[in-house]
Image (cartoon, coloured by chain):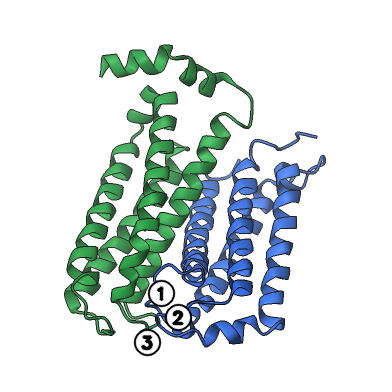
Chain colours: A green, B blue
Amino acid sequence: MTFVQQWTETSAFFIWLRESPSVWAYPTVMFLHTVGLAFTAGASVVIDLRLLGVARQLPVAPFARFFRSIWIGFWLTAISGLVMLGSDLDAKVTNRLFAPKMILVACAVVLMIVMRRRVFAAAAPDQTSVSASARVLAAASLACWIGAITAGRFMAYF
Amino acid sequence: MRFWWIVPFWKTLHYLSITLLVGVVGLVDLRIFGVAKGLPLRPLQRLMPWAALAFVMSFVTGAMLIRINPAGTLGPPVNVAFAAKTVFLVLIGLNDLLYFASGLKRQVDGVAAGESASVSAKIVAGVSLMLWVGVLYWSRMLTFLAGAI
């Protein structure tokens, strides 16, 4: 931890990120976080809604193909998040909402992987019916994303 | 100042609405591009009312945030990011209008599972996606560009 702390405190990149008034510094990293997040969480939420009964005519299996785009969005969010974390390590780690947010994100990602394997990969090509357990997974995923976004937003005020 | 949680409360609702909006628009646009071709487009477009609902929610929550701090957004001096965001939203409206008025929407409705959408539909979807990313950009810059000019 101390090594990471020292590195983020002394590296030219993190100093620039912290101190530059340019919109190309911190604001741009924040923007990348927002774009990645909006897409990753947004796509997951729509998939959750489908499993919960919205647009029932849509076959379930083809949604598996969206996961690659969702992962690209996820890594964009994760990397930009790590960069922001590094720019203000102490304040972020000691923020009361940081741990709950990360736990909710981790749960949402695990649920996404479980849903992909158990629900989308297992569905017949034309299947539109959704099992009760798949609906439970979808409801849990929806709750995790709503919680994570709420915690993330409130973090700036704690 | 009012209660400390008023601003993050409306911001959270604003973000949640935008997440749903970008999620629906993103998936429909990606399908038109050719991702997840197994999905027929007529039932997929039935998700669009959710995007419309999310837009109304974003608009209302955004209006609440402006009401709390009008000077930060409306100025004077006018916030460059807010002006640009408004222009991008108008362009999105025009792009959507083109999509419906030109008959592209009806054509796309006919795209069944496994079929590709036309090139013109792909262009409209690409423009939509880029404009929405632009709206996110200007929204993110709002707090940084307040009073920049």
Is residue A73 found left or right of B73 in the rendered image?
left
Q: Chain of mark 2?
A: B
The answer to which quarter of the image holds residue B43 is: bottom left
Residue B59 rendering spot, x and y as whole percentages = 63, 63
Q: Which quadrant: the N terminus of chain B?
A: top right
Mark 1: few, some, or many residues within 10 Å (few <14, many ≥20)? Answer: many
Q: Secondary structure at mark 2?
A: loop
Q: Amino acid at mark 3?
A: Gln
Q: Mark 1 or mark 2, which is nearer the start of the sequence? A: 1
Whether A77 is drawn above or below A20: the answer is below
- Label 2 – label 1 distance at C-alpha: 7 Å
Q: Amino acid at mark 1?
A: Lys
Do badges 2 and 3 share one subunit?
no
Determine which residue is flagged by label 1.
B37
- Label 3 – label 1 distance at C-alpha: 15 Å
Determine which residue is flagged by label 3.
A57
Determine which residue is flagged by label 2.
B115
Residue B94 rendering spot, x and y as whole percentages = 73, 69
Q: Using the rendered image of the protein, determine whether residue B104 is visible from the camera's viewpoint.
A: yes
